[in-house]
Image (cartoon, coloured by chain):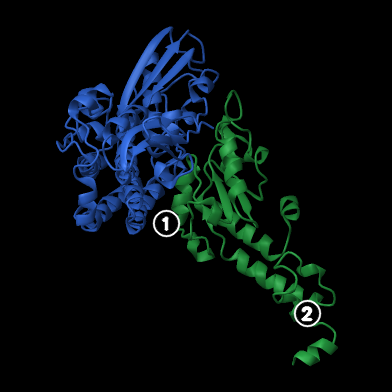
Amino acid sequence: MVEEIGTTPEGDIIINVGPQHPATHGVLHLVITINGETIKKVEPHLGYIHRSIEKMCESLTYRQFIYVTSRMDYLSAHINNHACALCVEKGLQIEIPSRAKVIRVIMDELTRIASHELWWGAMAMDLGAFTPFFHAFRERETINDIMEETCGARLTMNYMVPGGVMLDIHPNFQKRVKDFITLYKSKISEYDELVTGNIIFQNRMKGVGYLSPEDAISFGCTGPTAKGSGVSSDIRKLYPYEVYDQVQFDEVLETGCDSFARYMVRIREMNQSIRIIEQLIDNIPEGDFQAKTKAVLKLPKGEFYQRVETARGEFGVYIVSEGGTTPYRIKFRSPGFSNLSALDQMARGSKLGDLVAMMGTLDLVIPDIDR
Amino acid sequence: MSSNSNNSAPSPNTHLGAGGASFPGQLHETPGGGIVLSKLDDVINWARSNSLWPLTFATSCCGIEMMAVAAAKYDFSRFGFEVARASPRQADVIIIAGTIVNKMAPVLKRLYDQMADPKYVIAMGACAISGGPFFYNTYSVVKGADHVIPVDVYVAGCPPRPEALLHALISLQEKIKMGMTREQIKGG
């Protein structure tokens, strides 16, 4: 265990936060140098949940390796699987049925709402408000029930496979998704009343954790972290995949560059996800849900890259194939890793008590960072 | 009152006073007080089993299901678990929710050592039981949390359903109520 305690030659105090700390959302370890109450430096220490997933993937076949990626960013499990399935399909050069494409996009957007809801509850809990957690999980459980009915699992679904989706949707699927949309629209105003409009909350978020657009680009931030700084980085718009170029939605951008801007991006992104689902849920085409593929997949020799937009930003899968049944090398580009690297820049000069609010708006998932 | 008690045989209650045996470790050694004291033991076990405070310890995916159990739909506060503590010094039970890797193992050991007795451990999910999906071909995963600290109850699943975790918590309660030691709990 890397641990640093004591004082620097300049007389600054070094303190450790984590790896067991409720505000780090997992097992992140921060070594913080403080002068009085002002933060001078934040050093994240990683590896407390490094499970060597990339190395594991080298010995798993192209059908098998997808299940491991559900365990990386477990709040965006569908979207991770989606990226891997797309990358393998790119290598095999197969076209998937349009029914599968629409089902995939609906599932992605439901996952995004579930992830943002959990983030909303957890972040309010970081700031000391416990009630929003229960409100957020009320809606999230509805999505979990929908997922469970069709995919058979609540959290790590492994539903998307090369060639389409594993099973057809449940007969109740469309009705339950519509019920969820009605429920969500009746509850979203509670979110604003409880948290967004709260004056204490606003004072703790506004002007805290400033990240300039230039810094956001140079640190490689993506997703709501970059969008909060006004940097357009939505992969769904810039490099559309599946049916994202056929649906109407806006890329959410805020120009505040602070914690509150990143908060508002996520709240508004949930509404855009609802908008996408509304356009697609009545228009799921008939037909097959899976293309005909061989039992054993072999990618041709070469390199393949596919990026998607998860709830946290750009997730990329890079496969190097030697022509066999298993990849020669796999690299995952996880959004959390780049977003975390901006934490030091954000936190310098601010007070120690604000650090938790900043980390909350980054929406870190540690197994996604460590892999 | 005082002269009476000086002449008669010592009643069990006098041993519970300030000058008697320390509480509760030496209760069983008191002569002649078997019935009263074993009933007191039951009361203590009953109280202990219904106010188990879990440590908020989540390394990965299972932590989200643990949060779901804490939320309104499943609600483990119905069974006395709602006071989730962030500090190991205030916690009674540690729910290992997620994979333990080599770098995390010493931290887990230290957390366990910092908890006050009596303390209990639940291994939640396949990773904490045996390494689960990360059993083969990894260089960094501990193949089961019981290589690091002793485990009382194992919950299967990847991740386990919230009902499964509730079942594990209730099983642990029942075993504590039966007055079993850690070795007996482990033996089933």
Q: Nearer the viewer, residue A91 or B160?
A: B160
Circles 1, 2 touching at the beta carbon (< 8 Å): no
The residue beneath circle 1 is B71
Could you tell me residue B16's position as x and y percent? Answer: 72, 75
Which residue appears at 61% of the width and 55% of the height?
B116
Compared with A74, B70 (above or below) is below
**Chain letter, colour green in render:** B
Give the residue type at disc 2: Pro
Chain A pictured colour: blue
Left or right: A87 as drawn, with respect to A279: right
Could you tell me residue B121's position as x and y percent? Answer: 62, 50
The reply to whether label 1 and label 2 mark residues of one chain is yes
Could you tell me residue A371's position as x and y percent? Answer: 46, 28
Q: CA distance from mark 1 to mark 2?
A: 45 Å
Q: Nearer the viewer, residue B115 or B50?
A: B115
Which residue appears at 59% of the width and 36% of the height?
B105
Left or right: A328 as drawn, with respect to A117: right
Compared with B69, B143 (above or below) is above
Compared with A231, B172 (above or below) is below
Q: Nearer the viewer, residue B147 or A321?
A: B147
Which chain is home to disc 1? Answer: B
Is the residue marked by circle 1 packed among few (<14), some (14-19), or many (20+) residues within 10 Å? many
Q: Quadrant of residue B179?
A: bottom right
Which chain is home to disc 2? Answer: B
Which residue appears at 27% of the width and 25% of the height?
A241
The residue beneath circle 2 is B12
